[in-house]
Amino acid sequence: MGFALIIALAVACSSYVLSARYLRENQQQSALTNIHILGNDLDSDINTVLTFSNWICLDSTISNYLRTVDRSYSQDVQAGKKLSLSAWNHLNNEFNIVGVRNAVTRVVISTPSGTQFLQCVSGGNDQSVTDVPMTIMDTSFFDDLITASNFKWNGFYANPLSRGGNPKVLPMIRPIYSSSSSALIGWVYMDIPISVITDSLRSFVLTKDDALYITFSRGVTYRYTGSDLVKESVPEGAISYTLPDTGWILSYLPSRTALIDRMRSYQLLIVVISLVILFAGIILSISLQHTITRPVDRIITRLDKIGQGDFSRDGKIEWDNELGEIGRGINNLSENVSDLMDKRLLDEKARHDLEYQILQSQINPHFLYNTLNTIKWMATIQGSEGIADMSTSLSRLMKNISKSTEDLIPISDEFSLVDDYFTIMKYRYGGTIELDYITDDELLLKQRINRFSLQPIIENAIFHGIEPKGSAGRITIHTYRQGDNVIIDVTDNGVGMTADAIEEVLSGASQTSTEFFRQIGVFNVNERIKYTFGDSYGITIESEPGVYTTMRFTLPFVAPPEEAYI
């Protein structure tokens, strides 16, 4: 229950934090998307005004009018009027075509002195037209806007060309320069009524505690109230978007009330989830108590009894579930331990009997060595050198068989064992067999080989190679190095072997050893080498029936310590 309570609290806290973050991010993302759409629409409308202003500043007809109008009036009033009328028609046509009349109430183009001007009006005009340039030039914003390096927005002002000052306008003034000399030849004035901005913002629905702001330049920020724009600073936490063409900034402060209302529904859901988890934890606790806790206690009690020496079977811990399988395993284990203890007692008794037998058997080889040694000296006294040699060789061979425990010995020691065995065989066959050694490098004799590896091969060569031939035979043992390997070739000039016979010998299907080492055949020697050094080493056989048989030992070459140091 405590675990379920912790889980419930963790889920509740994490869910609350994540849901609050999700709702806040979702609200901000939604608001950002809305002000993106609103700002792009507003930017598109104002961009029309900016484009029209740039056209006026670059148009050749307007430029020609501003350069020559004063001179034309001074020389010929009719010519001056004609020039003014032509320029006004040109301006008015463009004013109506580009649709800028929907965004501005008045466009005024004037010479620097204000004596001559052109104007296009989209609505009514309460101001005398003769005072228009001078009235604009006398405003507080004129000098600041005309000297700005680019379009500058200082906020809303009372309409200077309306007696009541209404509606408020956003003035825009740009200088007009000569294309040839870059001299100031005039200026253009446009006024964007506040209704153009508020009409664009009206599509944005506001609630009671959210707010929308528009910033024209640093320190010039207005809050949209739903019908009007009131000068006010942007609070912290507002989301802002900069219009790409005008550089105006739309800022939106999301509604905290709406966020709290949405959070309440999430909080209710979190409470329900927490209660479900807690209820599930209670049910799970009761279920675990019945299915796990009590059975585990019984199993622990049973293990304590086993530790105290009670190995009897207890059927009460063998239920029809996973814990019952463990109980059955414990019962089987206790029975097996009991059986093992009984068997251990029998094995101890058998071991004591075997040790006694081994102690007795150690007397026999010692007696055999002494007997062979006595035969040797009697044969020597009587001049029977053959009997003495055979007795000596047999004595050494039996001693190595019964007492040596090393598995790997130097090749030179293995050759000594072969010499003892061959001495006995040479006398047996009346000197008709010969054994030669060819060693390319005496250092190779220090390499290690499995003990009693060569003797079964020599025995195989005598009994199955040379003896069936019915004539004298020769066995050659050639030791040489080949790359990182030591190679020992045992070659006899006997009857040879067929491919099938070679396969039988290497697979162990044919047992070819006899005499002393009946249990050690070619197959066993090959397996011992592979087991000791790896599968890439061992014995291979080459033979030509009626000519020869070569059994090749492949062993790893291990550099002596001084050679490895060099």
Image (tube, rainbow, N blue to C red):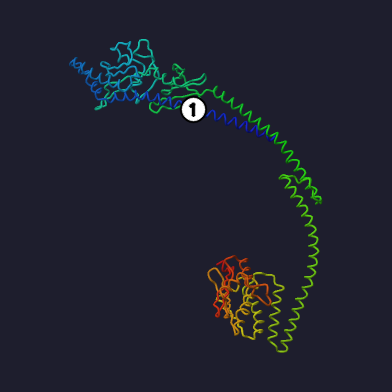
Q: Identify the residue at image location x=47%, y=27%.
A: 32
Relative vertical location of residue 358 with respect to residue 58 in this rendering, above or below: below
**Position in image of residue 435 (x %, y %):** 60, 81
Which quarter of the figure has residue 231?
top left
Q: Locate the N terminus by quadrant.
A: top right
Q: In this view, does 223 lie to the left or right of 422?
A: left
Which residue ends up furthest to the bottom in the rendered image?
382
Relative vertical location of residue 116 with respect to residue 481 in this rendering, above or below: above
**Position in image of residue 193 (x %, y %):** 38, 17
Q: Locate the C terminus by quadrant.
A: bottom right
Instruction: Between residue 415 and residue 303, name the one nearer to us.
Output: 303
**Position in image of residue 453 (x %, y %):** 63, 73
Circle 1 SS class: helix
Q: In this view, does 52 lie to the left or right of 31?
A: left
Relative vertical location of residue 197 with respect to residue 529 in this rendering, above or below: above
Q: Identify the residue at image location x=27%, y=23%.
A: 184
Q: Is residue 280 left or right of residue 351?
A: left
Q: Is residue 410 left or right of residue 51?
A: right
Instruction: Between residue 163 and residue 220, name the one nearer to us.
Output: 163
| Circle 1 residues within 10 Å: few <14, some 14–19, many ≥20 | few
**Amino acid type indicated by mark 1:** Ser
Relative vertical location of residue 154 with respect to residue 335 in this rendering, above or below: above
**Position in image of residue 349 (x %, y %):** 81, 64
Instruction: Between residue 519 and residue 101, name the one nearer to us.
Output: 519
Q: How many marks?
A: 1
Which residue ends up furthest to the left in the rendered image?
75
Which residue is identified by label 1?
30
Which quarter of the figure has residue 462?
bottom right
